Amino acid sequence: MTDLDIGEVARRAGVPASTLRFYEEKGLIASTGRRGLRRQYDPAVLERLGLIAMGRTAGFSLDEIASMFAPDGQPRIDRQMLASKAEELERRIRELSVLRDSLRHAAACPAPSHLECPTFRRLLKAAASGAVGTPRRRGSRRSSLR
């Protein structure tokens, strides 16, 4: 199969060409050359972009994703890192489920005022104590709903 033009790779991968150039700058992908002024890529780059997209969706940083590739470009994925990320996602899912249920309760609560609702007051007390907190900063290991 012949090399793909940057525009074709961008279209197939669903990312802008600027993202491809950025990934190339970060060493995540490499072009095979140029045809005129346009970068060319081996079709295998699409699989690599798929792995990058999966990593980003899972919450891995670009540096973490880069570490998942051997110098020859083949995937070298640390299973412990995957297990740790899965645990982190599981915690986040639980936290978001509690938050979702709390919001649904607050939206449907029959109390005349949220401050008169015992459930809402418990949630308010939990938030004030840090049990339900602010979103964490990127890279922080603290839970977003502490």
Image (cartoon, grey):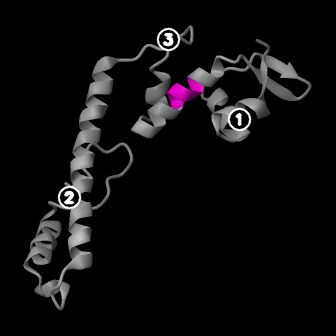
Task: Give the mark nearer the N terminus: 3 vs 2.
Answer: 3
Q: Which residue is mark 1?
A: 10
Question: Which of the two discs, 3 and 2, sits closer to the camera?
Answer: 2
Task: Give the mark nearer the N terminus: 1 vs 2.
Answer: 1
As displayed, is residue 45 above or below residue 126? Answer: above
Q: Quadrant of the C terminus?
A: bottom left
Amino acid beneath label 1:
Ala
Give the CA separation, mark 3 to mark 1.
Answer: 24 Å
Task: Give the mark nearer the N terminus: 3 vs 1.
Answer: 1
Q: Along the line of sight, which residue is nearer the eye, 68 or 7?
A: 7
Q: Residues within 10 Å of mark 1 (few under 14, many from 20)?
A: some
Quadrant of the rendered image containing residue 113: bottom left
In the shown orientation, is residue 37 left or right of residue 57? right
Q: Is residue 29 visible?
A: no
Amino acid beneath label 2:
Val
Position in image of residue 90 (x %, y %): 24, 40
Give the CA separation, mark 3 to mark 2.
Answer: 40 Å
Q: Residues within 10 Å of mark 2 (few under 14, many from 20)?
A: some
